[in-house]
Image: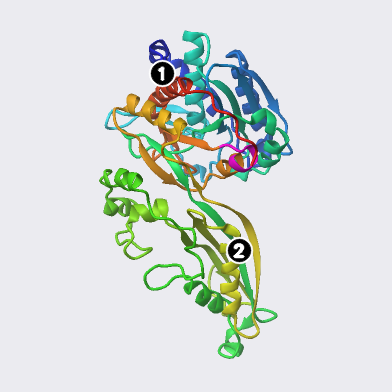
Amino acid sequence: MTDSTPALDYVETHIDDSLDRLFALMRVQSISTDPAYAEQCRVAAQLLADELTGLGFEARVAPTEGHPMVVAHQEGDGPHVLFYGHYDVQPVDPLALWKRDPFDPVLETRADGTKAIVGRGASDDKGQLRTFIEACRAWKETEGRLPVRVTILFEGEEESGSESLEPFLRANAEELKADFALICDTSMWDTATPGLTIGLRGMAGGQVTVRGPSRDLHSGLYGGPARNPIQVLTNILADLKDADGHVTLPGFYDGVHPLSDEVQKSWDALGFDAGEFLGDVGLSVPAGEKGVGVLEQSWARPTAEINGIWGGYTGEGFKTVIPAEAHAKVSFRLVGDQDPDQIWAAFEAHVRSRLPADCCAEFNVRGGSRAISLASDSPPLAATRAALDAEWGKSALLASGGSIPVVNSIRSILGMDSVMVGFALNDDNIHSPNEKYDLNSFHKGIRSWVRILGRLGAMEPARQTETA
């Protein structure tokens, strides 16, 4: 059985109950980055564990050095899957920009008649993880079983750095290992086109500080002969790209691969409008690499970006100083086989080779992760794509996305690849005021997971991969 008509019917007749359970979770103020909400994070974890126990899972709240994990197991036929999601949310600031209390969720009807769930965590990630729970509920209530063996891992620190995640994965590797992982923290292409993420850009980044004089100097006395660290740093950063938008670090493009024909055709069929994409954020002229399309730049090309820069006097009014130091935060999005350590080392060499006399540089590396590429024809992904096609009536887009560190952690520690399917939309205001999740995304997301579980259950169980 690849789909369960009774389970799909159950989703239809119990969608209001599913919404009530989502709203209950969204009312918990599980802001992981603020210690004042630590107890609320524990409440959210316990709520989920209790619910999963009620569905027949063997569930527990597992303590960590930070916020707790929720771990649950349910026996079933077919392959063994690990489902990952996170129950923590971002802070709500600036509160004045919210139309209502962020933790008082509501179903809002828009001018076009469509409906959206509004409140913090609606899309990232409470609404998304709940689509999977509700699909499991539909199977259990109608068939008395799940078509696959399921392990669930809900994290409570995804929005605050996931400091406890990798230690927890290492300490509990044998319990958490499965045939592959399922992650619902990604997006659709549009309201009618589902997406499967088969590539994630990696990351290298950190902070650079350039120091010059021993103290801030009066520019009337020292302007001209004294080195200005802001000028030095901005000159160095400007040299990161040439006139055509290519990154100038030696070896930067080593390991960058061309798109496959299948992925290129999938993207060409989208009818992507670069003008609309840029226009939505007040821009009109594409930047980046000359001769490379906007969509390919966003999904499949590496980048070098300056994320913040400061130095000298930045307060109100005016103060004529030559600063003693200048700072910048720099990040590189990586693709293919690019090595984050090599990229950051090349950046440090770039800076040091351009430092003039009397200046020095200091670096604070934030860390890095490699890009992830998944085979577009793997059996789990093919089964998931068939299920999405059946639910949405059109072929799922094979897309690439930004960095999701847990995918690398699952691969490196548990030795498993992940299937990434989500139902968020670009206008969901994730991390921003008035976060929302389309009711259609929530409803058809549940139905999609019902179908996905059925299709996965029809696969032959795979031999677990040894830990990498």
Residue at the disc numbered 2: 207
Judging depth in this view, the residue of 6 and 437 nearest the camera is 6
Q: Which residues are magenta?
A: 411-416
* 458 horizontally vs 169: left or right: left
* 415 horizontally vs 384: left or right: right
Name the spot of residue 428 as percent of width and height, x first: 41, 39
Q: Residue at x 63, y 31 (%)?
A: 177
Which mark sits nearer the N-terminus, 1 or 2? 1
Q: Residue at x 59, y 35 (%)?
A: 88
Q: What amino acid is at disc 2? A: Gln
Name the spot of residue 310 as percent of width and height, x first: 56, 68
**Do residues under tags 1 and 2 come within 8 Å of each other at their CB atoms?**
no
Instruction: Name the element at disc 1.
Output: loop
Q: Residue at x 57, y 58 (%)?
A: 340
Residue at the disc numbered 1: 2
Mark nearer the viewer, 1 or 2:
1
Name the spot of residue 46 as percent of width and height, x first: 65, 24
Q: What amino acid is at disc 1? A: Thr
Quarter the N terminus occupies: top left
Residue 294 belongs to magenta span: no
